[in-house]
Amino acid sequence: MTGLSSRSVHEWMASEASRALPRLLEDACRHFEDRSFEGFALRLASEFERIFALMHELYGWRWDFSLRLHDLVVAMARSSANLPGWIAKRDVRAADAAWMSSGTSVWAMTYTERFAGTITAVEDKVDYLESLGVTHLHLMPPYAVPGPENDGGYAVSSYRKVRPELGSTDDLTRLAKRLHKRGLGLVLDFVANHTADDHPWARSARRGEAPYDRFYLTFETRDEVDRWLPALRTIFPHRDGDGFTWVPDASGDGRWVWTTFYPYQWDLDYRNPEVLVAMAAELLHVVSLGPAVLRMDATPFLWKREGTNCENLPEAHLILQIFNAVVKVVSPSVRFLSEAIVHPDDVARFVRPDECALGYNPLHMALTWEAIATQDATMLVDAIRHRSRLPGGCQWISYLRSHDDIGWGFADEDAFRLGIDAVGHRRFLSDFYSGVFPGSFAAGELFGHNERTGDSRISGTLASLAGLERALESADVVEIDLAVNRIVAMQTLAFTTVGMPMLYLGDELGTCNDRSYPNEPGHEHDNRWMHRPRLDWARVAEAGRQPDSPSGRILAAVRRLGALRSQIPVFGAGNPEIVETGHRGVIAFVRRGGGMQLLVAVNLTPRDASVVLDCRGADWRTVEDGDVVPLERTMVPYEVVLAVTTSRTDISPGQVG
Ligand code: OTU
């Protein structure tokens, strides 16, 4: 017993941190050749106590705690001293990342090879991106991977190398810089949970070499694995095995390696502080490539504790907070995006200014699909009302789908409150979007079907899931028209409801499923490749020439939505205020900002809907041509109403959109 209260322990720690700092700075100073040390020293001084406290919380019990803290400071110093000049300049000018709150951001995501071929060729496509209003481009992991199976780049063999067929590290930094010059931010992944099984660390671990033999979560016996297993969720039920992989060694013996995803993706053991520091150094290397945002992959899985489901544990948050503080010291304008596709309570916990300022919003995503299938906006409206709020300075990424499957991640308790049976409803949604539910227009496939739990997720492009594929096949003009309008209605919600919209490139053209994926080596066992088609540039040209074709109409609508973001100042902060419509199938809300209000009303049904929009008291005019908007009206199938009212004289309805 020390007799110290927890408060005085905290004070003691703070004073130890401030005593240690000058010594560490003296040491760090050696890595710098010029004056940039000053900025580093100031930033480290402001973050150090926090880094110290976080590291202590995670690793204070370890004998090597202070050694690792020292290593971490050295990693930050090295990285800061070698940071390319343009990034340092960007950080000085835009440390506060003003784009976060401007409301004008539009994101796009794509695979370099499927979009442009190579990293260098991406530059030639910037005009196209600009025509969509895109401000942030997420290129799927371009790092070295084992071939041909590598989980679409999420099995990283080295962050220090780029896949040769895409180009070089120099190409990537050049692209980041050129994009920055044109006002676009690059988004790159950091896959903290695992490395590929051919990463140099994994190779050394296989040979039993220190210190890498302690880098991964491994077990000598199956009995040990079986103690953890019952509490765990199977993330990829379609793979062989159960999340643990037997890896034989040279002696004929071997170990079980924790592999949450595919057997070639080895989970790192963050209980070892050396792993955290080594990964922080890799993270800082990625920062030095020049991204504006780092997408933190699979955040829920970073920490494991026996007896729990090993998702969303408090320590996972501490790891992200340490990474965040470390990056803040080196490159303060960089923001993190959390990829947590879990219970909505847990999703939201990752989104905070000192952790991930941005978070994917898988709830609104799933419920937009839910509303379209049920022709009922009740669940979506409920989620907008109760689950949109984020801490100040944070934002959601709104999207209709990504490169991954669509999961039905609403909370059972929310469904229950609305009188909906969550389990049955999820089954209905999977049936609906895999096209087996009678009357369904969707052409998706089940992904990750779990025989034991009956759970399934869905693969498919926006267009195929929204009915365009089937409509085109049957050449039914009425169905084609409905599908196009359905897609536009859904994109309108993604672009206007909360946060920043994100497009999966290709969806703006109504691209359907790529059914040829099983012919590509390494893709045959993962039907997510069905919705990762190559961008069809001929179709882009055609869409321009034929504005009345399905592609032409969808592209034009997405461009209008992109333009809307930069023309109307309502998307910055604040959440939508729901407007009663008197019709379950019609969602309406108002967004306010910059002296303006935007009214969005969308008919989510394939039928006429009579509504009374309860937002009287303002002079609503359509965005398109400034016509007066009748609030009592019949909306045609999937009709979208975008209306503005303004107290400002410099913007008038009809000039926007
Ligand atoms: C992520 O997704 C990536 O987006 C996937 O493409 C990868 O395969 C995976 O990580 C492994 O790196 O389960 O179905 O809560 O759901 O991290 C996709 C987050 C996934 C997980 C998510 C994961």
Image (spheres, rainbow, N blue to C red):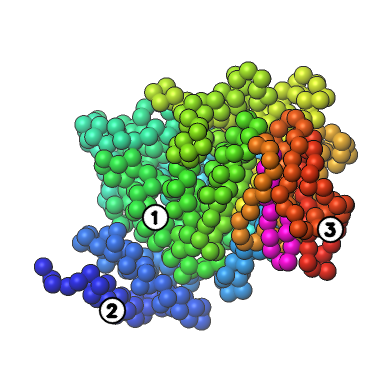
Is residue 250 something one can see in this rendering? no
Asked if residue 348 is positioned above or below residue 14 in the image, the reply reads above
**Kind of residue at badge 2:** Ser
Query: Relative to the observer, which residue lies in front, 3 or 649?
Result: 649
Splitting the image into 4 quarters, where does residue 136 fall? Answer: bottom right
SS at mark 2? helix
Q: Looking at the image, is mark 3 or mark 1 nearer the viewer?
A: 3
Q: Which mark is residue 653?
A: 3
| Left or right: 282 as drawn, with respect to 360 | left
Splitting the image into 4 quarters, where does residue 645 fall? Answer: bottom right
List x then y, in percent, for residue 572. 65, 61
- Alpha carbon distance from label 3 to label 1: 45 Å
Q: Which mark is residue 15?
A: 2
Q: Which residue is at 81% across, 25% downward? A: 478
Query: Relative to the observer, which residue lies in front, 567 or 196?
Result: 567
Within the magenta stretch, is there residue 258?
no
Q: Which span of residues is magenta-colored?
A: 586-598
Disc 1 residue crowd, few under 14, some 14–19, many 20+, Cα 10 Å: many
